Amino acid sequence: MNRFERLFGLKGEARVAYMHGEFRVEQPGDFVLCAVTGKPIAIADLRYWSVDLQEAYSSPDASLQRHLQLNKRRARGSGETPPTDGK
């Protein structure tokens, strides 16, 4: 720990295990990074994550964006046509 961390309480990025309905901080820190946007998310503000992918999201929109990305990749890999939204 350097003197700035002691003065300001900065701990950096946390390592978190995401579970159903809760998460466990495995390495203390002030934030985690959104897997989609790369923005820091304060641990106190962490609300959205994927248990299967073990990644955090800054908002419901970021979570949906990741879900759509993964479904598009899966559909491409299986030869299926990805679902469209009718537009």
Image (cartoon, rainbow, N blue to C red):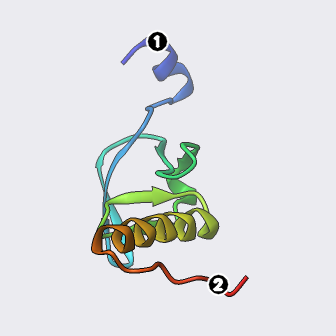
Label 1 SS: helix
Q: Is residue 24 left or right of residue 65?
A: left
Q: Is residue 60 left or right of residue 11?
A: right
Amino acid type shown at disc 1? Arg
Residue 30 pos. (x, y %):
48, 41
Q: Identify the image quadrant of residue 62.
A: bottom right
Which numbered disc flags the more N-terminal residue, 2 or 1?
A: 1
Q: Which residue is mark 1?
A: 3
Amino acid type shown at disc 2? Asp
Residue furthest toward the bottom? 86
In this view, the residue in front, 45 or 66, is 66
In this view, the residue in front, 64 or 78, is 78
Residue 29 pos. (x, y %):
41, 40
Few, some or many residues within 10 Å of mark 2 (<14, 14–19, 20+) = few
Image point (47%, 22%), residue name: 5
Q: In whole angstroms, how far apart are the C-alphas of marks 2 and 1?
A: 53 Å
Q: Which residue is mark 2?
A: 85
Residue 69 pos. (x, y %):
48, 64
As drawn, 19 above or below 46: below
Q: Quadrant of the N terminus?
A: top left
The reply to whether discs 2 and 1 touch (Cβ–Cβ < 8 Å) is no
Image point (44%, 66%), residue name: 49
Image point (34%, 71%), residue name: 74
As drawn, 67 above or below 54: below
As drawn, 78 above or below 46: below
Q: Identify the image quadrant of residue 2.
A: top left
Label 2 SS: loop
Marker disc for residue 81: none
